[in-house]
Amino acid sequence: MTTLLAPEDAEAPTPPRRRALRSGLEWVAVVVIALVAAVLVKTFVLQTFYIPSASMEHTLDINDRVFVNKLAYDFHPIHRGDIVVFTPTPAQRRIIGPGIDDLIKRVIGLPGETIQGIGNRIYINGKPLNEPYLSPGVVPTAGAVPLYKQKIPPNEYFLMGDNRGESKDSRYFGPVSGSQIVGRAFLRVWPLSRFGFI
């Protein structure tokens, strides 16, 4: 037997105006949550960076865009060969030039190591460094500033561009503190024809 609700027991339909208001509030909540999530992700997890110069060619070319993992070094140490984004100090900015907020370079030397350029090779603690990521024909020590023998201080990293002759890097402004490093670049997202891990 089916029980029918009496008219007074049935739920009254929601007026259209009230329904529209509730729907509007739901959409506002969704947009606010999405914006907060995007800001949190960009601030703490993942950010896109644009390559403005030729200093990392041909690993990264001008106008490439890469994703940078800002949490990478919360879980493991910085490794030689990592491509990192860092924020220059005011003194470093004076050497690099105006209009530069962040730079992207490759980690060559680690804290406590001795680095030196001899001839066309870079030496770490007296041993030649293998650099398979350099384009054919790139001289590892090329550049206007020689790579003098030096010991990298604790918690500092010696960074260089892959396009050595076109890169203002630690040869010019010295090692970079670990606290300046924003994160590790790991994925090229533009252009789509070159999409992939780096």
Image (tube, helix red, strand yellow):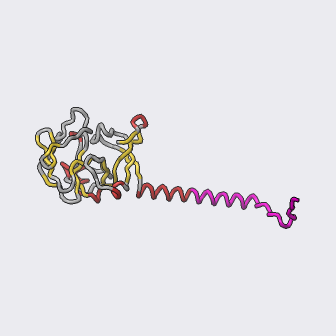
Q: Position of residue 79 (x, y in %)?
A: 27, 51
* Residue at 28% in and 41% down: 56
* Residue at 60% in and 58% down: 28
Quarter placement of the N terminus: bottom right
Asked if residue 23 can be seen in this view, the reply is yes
* Residue at 56% in and 56% down: 31
Q: Where is residue 166 in the image (x, y as percent from the top left)?
A: 23, 40
Q: Position of residue 134 (x, y in %)?
A: 25, 38
Please state if 157 lies on the left or on the right of 8 as rendered: left
- Residue 56 sits above or below residue 16 on the image: above
Residue 22 painted magenta = yes
Please state if 56 lies on the left or on the right of 118 as rendered: right
- Residue 57 sits above or below residue 170 on the image: above
Residue 147 painted magenta = no
For this orientation, the residue located farthest to the top is: 137
Quarter placement of the C terminus: top left
Please state if 19 lies on the left or on the right of 87 as rendered: right
* Residue at 24% in and 43% down: 167
Write down the region rendered in magenta.
Answer: 1-30
Q: In which quarter of the image is residue 121?
A: top left
Q: Where is residue 145 in the image (x, y as percent from the top left)?
A: 15, 45
